[in-house]
Image (spheres, rainbow, N blue to C red):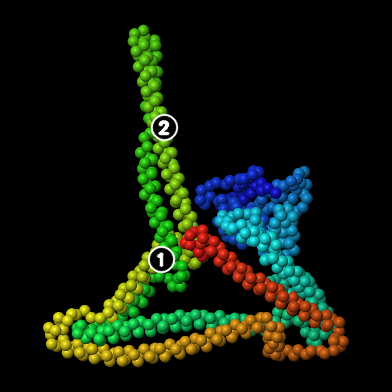
Amino acid sequence: MILRSIELEGFGRFRGQTVEFRRGLNLVIGPNEAGKSTIAEAVPAVLFGTDRLERFKPWGRNVCSASLFFEGRGHTVEVKRNLMTDEVELVEKDDLYHVRSQFSGNAPLRGRSASCREYRALLEKLIGVADEKLFRATYFFGHHPQSWSGDELALKLRTLVSGTAEADYAEILDTLLEEHFQLTRSNPWGRDKQRDREYETVCQQLSEQGDEGAVPIFVEIDNPGHDDRQVALEEEIGALTGELEFERQEYEKGQRYIERFRLQADIKEEEVELPAKVDTVKEENPGTSKTLAEKMAAAGLPPSLPSQLPEVLSAAAEIRQELAALQQPFSILHGREKKIPQVPWMVIGGLLVLFVVLAAVAFWQPFFKTPLLTTVGVCSVALLAWVSWRQINRNKIQEQCRKERGLLEQKKGVAQQRQAELSERCDALGLPSSAVDLVRLHKLVMTHRALLDQYWSAKESDGSGVDASAEVVGSEPSSRIVTKAVVEEDLLKDDEDAGELRQLEARLAEFAANLQEKEARLEELRAQLKSDMHSPGGAAEAAADVASQQGVLVQEISVKNAMSPLQRRKIELEERIVVLRKSINLLADAVDEFSRSHLVTLNAEAGKMFGKITGGRYTEI
């Protein structure tokens, strides 16, 4: 199967354009942002759909569609998709343009309806693959293909082809859903079905027979009491987790404050041991912390910044320096290109015409014929030789300038590519991606750092000791009295500081004990939630609680023979529906958890390989 053409009716920046391909290797060349990646992404988007519609939707238009045309041995396949509605039209024709197979319907990316299964089966029959991930890992290479070693690539391909990760899960889930909707039309995961199933029919027959009071219509399939209990536990766990995180931060701040307090106490003890060097006592500015907070708030740095901000800002600064460094070579090269001497073709043409006229005159006149013709010929040859030399020299200089410009453009392209990747990273971190905003953010960070440096330097200067010398102390007798009084006052302050330090340590120990109690409570709630999710007893207990709150008395009928066949069938259907719904929810949750853990492992492996490639510069993705 060969891809012959791509018709982009409204896809990205393309409107009503067709890209045709020939047999063999086709190369698409264009400048940055010309649409090369958009053309490549159109293939999986048309075949399987996309969840990034806003990326490919044309600006200002409510139309986004494209089509693919494949050619094989004896048949052709055309696939057309409207990405706005996921309406797909697939037509297979033979060499005589007779329709061999056809599909028309809705087939979204992660749809599980009967039409989706029919489309994927037909797609697998025609092109050999019906899964987007498998297609991207084997047939398709996007803008940034993954790099693996030989053994790792073979392992990844075996995992994808075997279908152990997702294909079997989808098949089992489809089977469970199909069995569930054969029993009831109620859909707890979405919109209910329109046609009544067996359970609704049985309930309707019981209602018509007047048995609705004895056997009420089953409304507790979804176990809302158990769900409410789980929701309450999850909300309490979330609130307690946020509270613990805040209190841990406060506990760390308290530890740092006590460490600074102890450091200042040690400094004061050293000052008391040298009273002869004490002259004046500097008073601490009580408004330092207040003015610092006001200055930092006035600086305008937004709160809740990511931890990768310094790395992002340093990378942005490097890119700006590289682009600024390239401006001067570009300007120098542009000046050299302007200074390349031009060949005066108009003057040369005029001289050649003059030489031809002189030769004609010398040919028709009998006097000085030979010397004049010889002079004209020599001048013509010399002029042509000079013109050739001038043109060859100009071509050499232009070729050298083109090579230098190509190297500079290559460096500029690399820098712009890094800037684009940095912009995507900033978008992922919630930071502004424009260069102006990054420069402003860098200035705000530097302002904050300067304020903090001034604050800590002021703190160190306030507790570093005294400024006077021993000469001043010896020169004035009254200064000794002042020094003695100051030392005694410092000793009293040391006793007060020691008492305050003990009080702070006691409060911190009490705070730590309270923190441990809350952590134990959090672990208890998590264990309780886990047991309620996996134990059938918890579900039964929750259902019993809801039934008691609603005033519904549920009695077990010991003798099933006393029931009517419809009543027994209703109970059997209820039990089966409960089992199916629990199985579907459990399977979906398990696969989601596995996908998250598998993604983390995959990112770790890719980070290790990326670190090896970049020499340890980038080790995380």
Viewed as shown, does residue 162 lie left or right of 602?
right
In the rendered image, the vertical position of residue 32 relative to residue 399, given as above or below: below
In the rendered image, the vertical position of residue 66 relative to residue 402, given as above or below: below
Across and down, in percent, residue 578 comes to 74, 79
Label whose residue precedes the other's in the sequence (2 or 1): 2
Which residue sits furthest top?
366
Neighbours of disc 2 within 10 Å: few (<14), some (14-19), many (20+): few
Label count reads 2
Residue 229 falls in image quadrant:
bottom right
Instruction: Give the labeled residue for mark 2.
Output: 392
Across and down, in percent, residue 594 comes to 64, 71
Across and down, in percent, residue 506 comes to 42, 90
Helix, strand or loop at mark 2: helix
User: Of residues 337 and 352, which is closer to you in this image?
Assistant: 337
User: Of residues 285 and 25, which is closer to you in this image?
Assistant: 25
Instruction: Give the labeled residue for mark 1.
Output: 441
In the rendered image, the vertical position of residue 445 relative to residue 258, given as above or below: above
User: Of residues 273 and 147, which is closer to you in this image?
Assistant: 273
Viewed as shown, does residue 377 lie left or right of 181?
left
Q: Is residue 525 visible?
A: yes
In the rendered image, the vertical position of residue 348 relative to residue 330, given as above or below: above
Q: Residue at x 21, y 90 (%)?
A: 485
Q: Is residue 61 visible?
A: no
Tell whether label 1 touches label 2 (CB within 8 Å): no
Helix, strand or loop at mark 1: helix
Residue 147 falls in image quadrant:
bottom right
Amino acid type shown at disc 1: Leu
